[in-house]
Image (cartoon, rainbow, N blue to C red):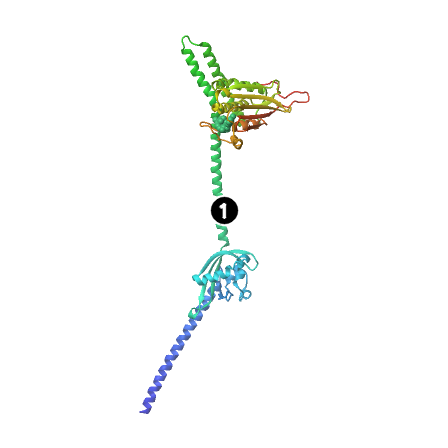
Amino acid sequence: MIARRDNSRVADLEKQVSELTDEIAAAREAERQALHSSAQFAILVQSIKEYAIYMMDNAGHIISWNGGAERIKGYSRDEIIGRHFSRFYTEADRKSGLPTKALRQAVVEGKFEGEGWRVRKDGSQFWASVVIHPIYGSSRTLIGFAKVTRDITDRRHAQNMLEQKNKDLELFAARLQRERDDKLMNARAIVAVIAHEVRQPLTAITAGGYAAQRFLKMVPPEHDQTQNALERIVNAGHRTSEIIDGFRALFARGVQKQKLMDINETIRGVLKSLSSDLYAHHVELRAELTPNLPPVYGNRGQLQQVISNLIVNSIEAMETTPNRSRVLLVRSELRDNKAIAVGVKDSGPGIDKNRLDGIFTTFVSTKQHGMGLGLVISRMIIDYHGGKLTASSDGKEGASFQFLLPTAPVDKDGIRAGETIAT
Ligand SMILES: Nc1ncnc2c1ncn2[C@@H]1O[C@H](COP(=O)(O)OP(=O)(O)OP(=O)(O)O)[C@@H](O)[C@H]1O
Ligand SMILES: [Mg+2]
């Protein structure tokens, strides 16, 4: 009876031992497999060369180091284990506390991701893409961090190059657009300038034509008056050609041909062509032209334009002045024996002192139908002749415009280059 009981206990014990042995074997196998897989994992991590993968303790000291980290950052395992990971950051980043902030963000947000310059052992820098994950032990205590860093300097260079190329392309496109706009603007300005200058003689031609028709329809026809009107048309036609020739010369490439000319004759020519306008606007003309002035080198059509623009401005300015006191003074005189001064002064309302400079700017006009080009063109022409066009006014007693032109130089025998004097 006792022997049977002992046998069954032995059998129980044997069963328990066998179960325990199985459990121990299973545990060993699990441990072996775990060891095997963590060793495999370690080998895998170690063999990765494209990424620096390493672990840090919870304060940021390095506790593991893979082959990629060694390749990218230049430190061997022995050199770096135990060191603080902040040494990979630039001095500026270290000073701003970026390493600590990165760890804090990894803890708070579960992950830190960023890009930035990092420093290799040899001091050179590379553009890094960084990911930091916190690692927790049992009972959720922070035991460290896993950090993966990739060198993406090449990608960044390529990206930078692409961005630079795009910027260059944008600049190039903008420049092309600007050049196109400038060309259009120039073309518009040239058309406007020519239209501006030929308007006056064209108006004279049309007015002369109407007048001639009227005189011929009279009974009996007014032949003398018709003749006068036709003469005015012919003169205005010549004037138009001169204006166009003047522009051609002004915009032509290279040096334009200038002739010796008598400025008084030029002034008289303009006064004659504007005589009917002066008369129609009740303007009293006073011409004080100094006789026997030395000649100047110039383009007659262009200088006529300047004088005409100044006189037309004066006539227009005096429209608000009572008829009786509309006086236009045109003067010419020699200055210091080396320049000729031509002045056009009127009795109009004058120009405010603070507006004086602005009137020489393109498209600045106070007139309803003014183009704001007359003075710009005039200054351009006088500049081209080596002279100077200025305006003065006290804003009350009329405006005064003056241009200076250098007299034609004479050689030691007192002879000027250019045989004939154009009038
Ligand atoms: N003699 C003057 N008296 C008063 N203001 C003047 C006189 N001359 C020019 N100005 C002022 O200067 C401005 C510019 O003159 P500018 O001759 O360049 O253009 P504009 O006469 O207005 O037009 P346009 O191009 O048709 O000649 C005029 O609008 C006017 O305000
Ligand atoms: Mg004008």
Of helix, strand and loop, which one carries label 1?
Answer: helix
Instruction: Give how far across and how far down residue 151 sits, in percent.
Output: 50, 57
Pick the quarter of the image with the N terminus.
bottom left
Q: Residue furthest top?
A: 220
Identity of the residue drawn at 48% across and 16% down: 232
Q: Residue furthest right?
A: 412
Instruction: Give how far across and how far down residue 21 sits, in percent.
Output: 39, 79
In this picture, residue 207 sits left or right of residue 249: left
Instruction: Kindly tell me whether residue 68 is visible in this rendering.
Output: no
Image height of 61 relative to 237, above or below: below
Q: Residue furthest left?
A: 1
Q: Which residue is mark 1?
A: 164
Graded by Cα atoms within 10 Å as few (under 14), some (14 to 19) or many (20 or more), the crowding at tag 1 reads: few
Pick the quarter of the image with the C terminus.
top right
Instruction: Give how far across and how far down residue 192 sits, in percent.
Output: 47, 28
| Amino acid type, residue under disc 1 in the picture | Gln
Image height of 354 relative to 335, above or below: below
Instruction: Give how far across and how far down residue 269 sits, in percent.
Output: 54, 18
Identity of the residue drawn at 38% across and 82% down: 17
Give the number of marks: 1
- Compare residues 316 and 181 and report the one nearer the observer: 316
Image height of 345 relative to 41, above or below: above
- Compare residues 401 and 243 and report the one nearer the observer: 401
Image height of 22 relative to 3, above or below: above
Instruction: Kindly tell me whether residue 328 is visible in this rendering.
Output: yes
